[in-house]
Image: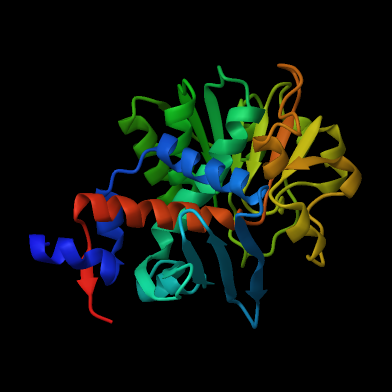
Amino acid sequence: MSNSAHNSMVDKMLYLSKSDLKSLNITTDQAIESLEFLIKQQTKSEVWTAPKTVVRPDHRYLMTTLSAANEPNLMSVKSLILNQKNPEKGLSAINSLITLLDGDTGVPKAVMDGNWVTAMRTACASAVAARCMANRNSSVVAFIGCGVQANSHLQAYSDLFPLSEIRAFGRGAHNRDALCESAISKGLKAVACDSPEQAVAGADLIVTSIPMTIEVDPFIDCNWLKPGAFVSSTDMGLPFMTKTLSVLDRIIIDDFEQERSMPNPMAPTELISGDITSLVTGNSVGRGSENERTMFLFRAVVLGDLALSALAYQTAIEKSIGTVLSL
């Protein structure tokens, strides 16, 4: 990008590709700080979100999210389609786009790859919860589902915990083996598991991320969890046997207001201890003792899309990364 383009880019629309976004080198700490700031601002009525909208016309999962803030003065809208038939066409199963508008005028400020944002913001939300709900000395992480979310969580959890081993269980050997190779490249032991119980039993951290378009009978028994384990269920708890959730000592969800608008609850209301806002503000306790079994159960932390896309936009401006588009 030329200097003249950089000088005027704040007044025009910026396009950020996946490679642009990766080159920003945004850290886990930066992502967490950005999300926690917006969560706290929301309690001051300085941030607004709408519950995510989902349409499932057939085998596809179509979703949008919307959030806005006074600081940064931006509105983000994400459009996403999940289609498990995409890999047959050489495409990612999930494809999405983020648009950023000026919060006052509505003037477009940026468009960017939504897949990067989705991966980063989901892992970021998990990381925010994990810092409060997991034991700090956690060293073994189990992944149920070995796709994009497993990889983004591996990076985030590697930054937060003294990991020594991962366990991987998933439908496809290719994704499972790729995740194991990534862990080995980080100096970790990697175990490809033949069953979910083999992966989960004895793990300190568990991340589940089965695709929303796959219908499966619940297959994880919470009784398998060791005392002190922490679960991040990015898939609304679909893999877990509902009747066994009661063995957990603490369940935190993403958003009480959003959950009230949903027809199918993720967990019985009486088992829920709080949401991510109450966790960040200190109104809910993430962990009472080292032996508690805890879970962060979520559909989508909508604010994460704004937090990560705004952070990416501001960082791109500072580093002169991206393509300036004329309106």
Task: State the residue at coordinates (62%, 21%).
Answer: 135
Q: Quadrant of the N terminus?
A: bottom left
Query: Image check: 38 left or right of 12?
Result: right
Q: Residue at image x 81%, y 29%?
A: 249
Of residue 61 and residue 318, the one placed in the foreground of this image is 318
**Location of residue 42 with respect to 213 vertically, above or below:** above
Place of residue 305 in the rendered image (x, y in percent of width and height, measured from the top left): 50, 58
Q: Residue at x 53, y 43 (%)?
A: 37
Q: Position of residue 100 (x, y in %)?
A: 42, 68
User: Which one is nearer the viewer's eye here, 232 or 276?
Assistant: 276
> Which quarter of the figure is the C terminus placed in?
bottom left
**Res 148 visible:** no
- Give the percent coordinates (x, y) of residue 217: 75, 57
Q: Residue 323: x and y, percent?
A: 21, 67
Left or right of 9, for residue 253: right
Q: Quadrant of residue 228?
A: top right
What colouring style does the render use?
A: rainbow
Question: Relative to 279, is 311 on the left or the right?
Answer: left
Residue 87 in view, yes or no? yes
- Residue with the most extreme right position: 270
Q: Nearer the viewer, residue 49 or 274?
A: 49
Name the side, left or right, on which 316 lies relative to 199.
Answer: left
Q: How many marks?
A: 0
